[in-house]
Every structure is written in structure tokens, then in C-alpha cells.
Amino acid sequence: MSDEPTLPTGARPDPDHPGWYSWGDMPAESFAAQTGRIVFRPDAPGRAVVRMFPEDRHLNLGGSMHGGAVMSFIDMALFSGGFCAGMARGHYVTLDMSTRFIARGRSGVPLDAHIRLLKQTPGGLVFIDGHCEQDGDICYSFTGTLKRIKSRSETGDAATPDAERR
């Protein structure tokens, strides 16, 4: 773990959101594309903010953000936010993630995940917690554990565009 912020591989300044970084648009055929563009930035030592732009397609039949959309975004935020908060370079997978649904998320209002990098072990475990806000109100809180593994290129498996971004 480093107090120096880093950016995820392939990140670049987002032209539509000054001060934020992104990977641009995800490949249309990827699952990650369903979340839409996300932007991220280092915040303070060991911290980062990751933003999604919820649309009507992210809502459930009751008009709130769908839990699956929320959890997919949080999972992506663990990685992009983790790197911005100082997580060591490497290829990671999610071991576990817990989400508490505190208030309803809405479309048309940016959803910000505030990431806190708690600890990174020499064995490659990373512990992260945080919360999501819309208009300054907390709507979700979460914890997650990531594990550094050998990349697909090191094991001989074909790499996917999503894997290369992590």
C-alpha cells in the first residue's frame, strides 16, 4: 500500500469531466459497459472518489436504482478507486463484497463512491470500505476484499479488454 495515488492502467484525463480520469467508453459487448462511463480521482492519502452517472436503464420497477446496478458499480469502484487510493499494481479479483442499502438511488444524479483503502497485505489481500452518496446524502455503504493473482498473460490464458483495464 502506498500513500502516493496512482491511476489504473489505461486511465487518462476525462475530456468531459475536468479533474477526473476515466478509461473512456467500455467495449459495448462487455458487461462493464452496462454501468456506463465511470470517472475517478484520488482524493486524499488512501482515499479516492469514483463516479457513475445513473440513467433510467439502471432503475428497478419501483423507480429506484437496481441493486444489481449498484453492486456492479461498487465492484468496479473497488478497483479504480483502490488504485487511485494507492493500491499496489497488479491483477486483482474480488473475494467478497458486502453492500448495505441505506436510501434509494435515483437516475439523473451522479452517484459517488468514496473509497478508503484500509490495508494491503504482503500476500496480496486488499481491504477497502466506503460509501456512496448522491447530492451529499449517503445511500449505500460497502466493504470489499480483493486478492492479487497472476494475470492471464502470466498463466497463458487470453486476456480480455476488461482484464487489461484492471
Image (cartoon, helix red, strand yellow):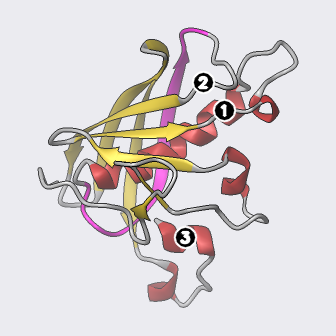
Mark 3 or 1: in front is 1
Q: Which is more N-terminal, label 3 or label 2?
A: 2
Give the class, few, some or many, for how many residues have Cα within 10 Å of label 2's Cα (few <14, many ≥20). Answer: some
Question: Which residue sits at x=13%, y=55%?
Answer: 4
Q: Is residue 102 left or right of residue 141?
A: right
What is the spatial separation of the Cα atoms under label 1 and label 2, in whole angstroms?
Answer: 7 Å
Which residues fall within the magenta stretch? Answer: 87-103
Instruction: Give the residue number, with chain letter if any, for mark 2.
Output: 109
Residue 65: image x %, image y %?
70, 23
Identify which residue is drawn at 48% across, 58% down: 15
User: At label 3, which amino acid type do we have?
Assistant: Ala
Q: Is mark 3 on a helix, strand or loop?
A: helix
- The image quadrant that residue 70 belongs to is top right
Marks 2 and 3, how far apart in space? 29 Å
At numbered mark 1, what does the secondary structure look like: helix, strand or loop? loop
From the image, state whether disc 2 or disc 3 is nearer to you.
2
Residue 54: mark? 1
Residues at circles 2 and 3 in contact by the CB criterion of under 8 Å = no
Task: From the top left corner, tell me how far across and down residue 13 is, in percent.
Answer: 40, 60
User: Which of 138/121 is in front?
Assistant: 138
Q: Mark 3 points at which residue?
A: 163
- Determine whether label 1 and label 2 are within 8 Å by CB: yes
Residue at far right of view? 61
Q: Can residue 95 be seen in this view?
A: no
